[in-house]
Structures are given as structure tokens and as C-alpha cells.
Image (cartoon, rainbow, N blue to C red):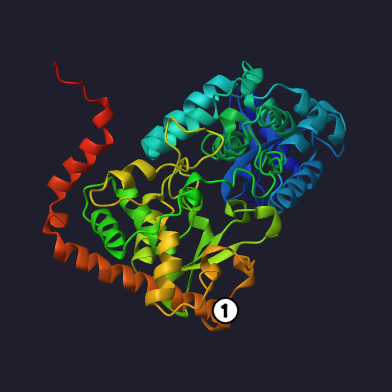
Amino acid sequence: MPELITAKILKKAFKDHRDGGRYDVSDSRIAGLQLRVKPDAGVRWSMRARLHGDQRRYDLGPAVAGDQDIDGLSIDGARARASRVAEMTRQGHNPATYLAALAAGVSMETQIRIERERPQPSWTWEDAKKAFLAETLRTRREDTHRDYNGKLQPPELSRFDGRLVNTISRNEMAAAIADVHARGKEAMAEGMVRVIRRMWNWLAEATRQNATSVADGVMLKLEAPERTRVELGEEAFDPDDEDGYTPDPIEIGRALAVARLGCLPERIGLGLELMIGTVQRRRAVTGASRWRFKEYAEVKGEQAWYVPPYFRKSGTKRGNRSHLVPVVGYAALAAARLDKLSDFEGSEGWLFPAGKSTRADRGHAESGLFNDWLSAIPGVSFSTHGGRYAFTTHGERDLGFAQAEGKLILDHLEGVEPTDVTGQFYSSDPQISRKRAMMKAWTAWCDEWTAKAIKDDRTLLNADLIGRTIRDERYKHKKKKAPG
């Protein structure tokens, strides 16, 4: 039971200490204040208080008789100090530095400086990387681990070898990333920022912060330098643009039938559907990002694709805004499935992520991804650009498109951004409504010709046969010639 600590109780405590006594007396005036008697430690004041939900005990110093706080604390001095500790913990402040300053006889500012200069426990850069990657491998996909490991290997980060991670500043890390950016690896630099932020957040988590001494939010505002400006329309020339061949409708149907058959790699089949169903250039398709597709509640079963201006032909004349393409019918289903396939760490949102042999600074597949596959489909002789020619030619002949109206979809005449178009505007704007109607007519026409192609040639339902035929066509140049 707490009781009021008086001079009489204090005097008895000193006597009991000399006799080897051991006990605590709780003060009834200041909750948490105790007079502690121990044979080895003497008679001391302590304060029990709750900080951040945890009950803790703080040593206030030795007790002394009388009213003067000389070489220790009197009863009034102990109560005053205990009250200060109670107030600090209520406000969420740790009183340890305050008590250490009092014990050392220095100011709070001096004690804070001393503590800052005192080496803190931490991990080396190498050990931190090893532990972080091990945790990533335990909790994430192998692709994520591979991505994170790659982003932490550039030679520019070797400057931190042997350094304790709690001594590495954001500005030092930014300088290392800027050096990666400067040697032309701009996408790599951006990926490094993402991984290093994640790593520092992990190092600062409560379960390991005492071991790493990494403060919260150190890398929060870490950024890579802006990408180098590329002239819009650069690399816009596409040999397929010069092909000029308009495929017969049955060829479009055959290509789509095979794309849906399941004999092609899943991304290739879906990519062909997306390319034919949206009639966009192959570079726009292989460089498509999941973040450029939007769905609106007002319009079910379709998406709006905001094609970035750097995929436009003669982009310098088109401004800096995106080209909106309604994605409907089978193309919308393909886009949705591609989005799910890209839902993993390391894809960076690309519907067609770069392979191991693709330039690391681009992130997405190279533009010729579909060429060999398309040309190997039996009965199909058009290039990846053929769907665009078919859209214009057959659109005017069969679908009621006005002369040159196909340019609404093909030539990127307007410029919009996802933030500029609400679902209501997307579903009601006259120009967009016309584009939606055109794309619905086009995808329905494609479906009709796909059904006709299958009716005319039932082998288009034989995945094994068509798959072997395509493989033989693609790899025929690798087969050894038979001896003569």
C-alpha cells in the first residue's frame, strides 16, 4: 500500500540498509514514486511511468536526509523530479536523456550532443543488404527477389561498402543514384530508388530498429534525376508502316483464331488480340503500361487506353498529351488478362516486361516482339501494321466509316490526360462516343471473320497441329540441312 514518505521513513530506510534490508516504499503523494532499499545499491529514488503503452522504471538518484539536494535527492527534490518524469512520459517523451544530463551535471543540450556522438549499434551495408534480400526471398516471389537483388548491385553503390547503414544519408544515396542515371541507366536509377526506399523502411521497422539504429523516413524523399528529354517522334519510323499491304478479312480472322487457340505463349496471344483489337502501332502495344488503362463505372466491359505521346508518329507535331483509344470487346478482355499477368514486383507495370536479353533501361519488350509469331501463322501474310490498313480500308467499305474517319483512332489527332476525363465525359463526349462506336463495330467485324475462318478451316481448332506448324516456321532456319 502506498504511504506518505516522511523524514522518519527515510531515516529508517538508511538504518535498514545498513542492516542488510531490502524493500520498496511507494509514495502516496506522487503516483509511481518509490524509495528503494537494497543492500548493494543503497537507498535510491525511482519512478515507474508508462511510455508508449509500456510500463518502465526510471532511476532518479540516491536519497539524502534533510532538505538540501546535495549529493542526492531530498524528499521534495525526488517528488519534483518524479513529477517532471511523469509529465514527459505523458507527452510521449523519453526522460532518459533528461535524467542522464542531471546525473552528469550538464545541460540537456550537452547531453544530447554527447549521445549523438556516441556510436550507435547498426549493421554494415553488406550485412543489411544480405538480411533484406533474405527477408525478401522468404516473403515475396522469386521474381521480386531477383529484381531487388539486381537493383542493389550497381557498382556505384560500392562506395557504401563497410559503412554502417545508420550513417548513410539520403543525399549520399541520391549522389550514387545520380551517377547511375548519368551513365545512361535512367530506368535502373528509378528502380533503385524504389528498392532502396523499401529497404530503409524495413531497416527502420520496430522489430529491428534497435539493432540498426536507422531512423524513420530517412529515404522517404529520395528521388532519381528526371529522365533525359527525348524528342517526341524520335525512332518513330517503323518499317511495317511502309508495308502498305491490306490483308483480306479472312486473314484477320485466322490471326485472331490462332491467338485465341492457346498454342502461342499467353502474352503473345493476348498481345496480338490487343494489337488487332485497338489497331495501334506495335511499339505502342509492346510499350503499354497497365497504369495507362482506365475503367469507368459508367461504361461496363471496356477500358480507355491513354497512349503516351512518345508512341506517336511525328510526335513533335502532336503536343504533349495522350491519345485516347477505347478498348472494347475481345481487346478489353485481353487487356484485363494482361493486367493480371503483370501484377508482380519487377514488372514495373509493363504489360510486356522486358526479357533478360532486352535493354535494361527500357523496361518493356522490344517493338519486334510479335513479328516472328505473326508471320509464322499459317495463312497469314500481313505484318503487324496490317490491322491498321484493314481498319481503314474495310472500315470504310463494310462498317460505314466516313472517308478518312479512321484517323480518329489511327492518327492521334486529339490530346487528353486520364485526369481530364471523367467517366461521365468519357461516355457522353460526341468525339469519344464516335470512337467507341467505331471500335465496337471493328471488334464485332473481327469476331465475325474469326468465326468464318474457323468454319472454313477446322484445323484452326487443333492447337497441337497449329502449334507445331508455327514452331517449324519460326525455327526452320535453325534446322540442320539433311546430307545430300
Q: Which of 484 and 437 is in front in this view?
A: 484
Circle 1 packing at 10 Å, graded few (<14), some (14-19), many (20+), is few
Judged left or right of residue 313, residue 103 is: right
Name which residue type carries label 1. Gln
To which residue does mark 1 refer?
A: 431
Residue at the location (24% across, 54% down)?
258
Residue at the location (39% across, 63% down)?
277
Q: Quadrant of residue 279?
A: bottom left
Please count the marks in the image. Answer: 1
Quick check: can you spot residue 69? no
Q: Which of 114 and 24 is in front in this view?
A: 114
Where is residue 148 shown, x and y percent of the image?
Answer: 49, 33
Question: What quarter of the picture does the C terminus occupy?
Answer: top left
Judged left or right of residue 384, residue 36 is: right
Q: Nearer the viewer, residue 418 or 472?
A: 472
Q: Quadrant of residue 408?
A: bottom right
- Compared with 98, 125 (above or below) is above
Where is residue 263 shown, x and y percent of the image?
Answer: 21, 48
Judged left or right of residue 364, residue 87 is: right
Where is residue 273 shown, x and y percent of the image?
Answer: 35, 58
Quick check: can you spot residue 67? yes
Q: Nearer the viewer, residue 5 or 317?
A: 317
Judged left or right of residue 327, residue 160 is: right
- Compared with 463, 183 (above or below) is above
Where is residue 260 shown, x and y percent of the image?
Answer: 25, 57
Q: What element carries label 1?
A: helix
- Compared with 29, 301 (above or below) is below
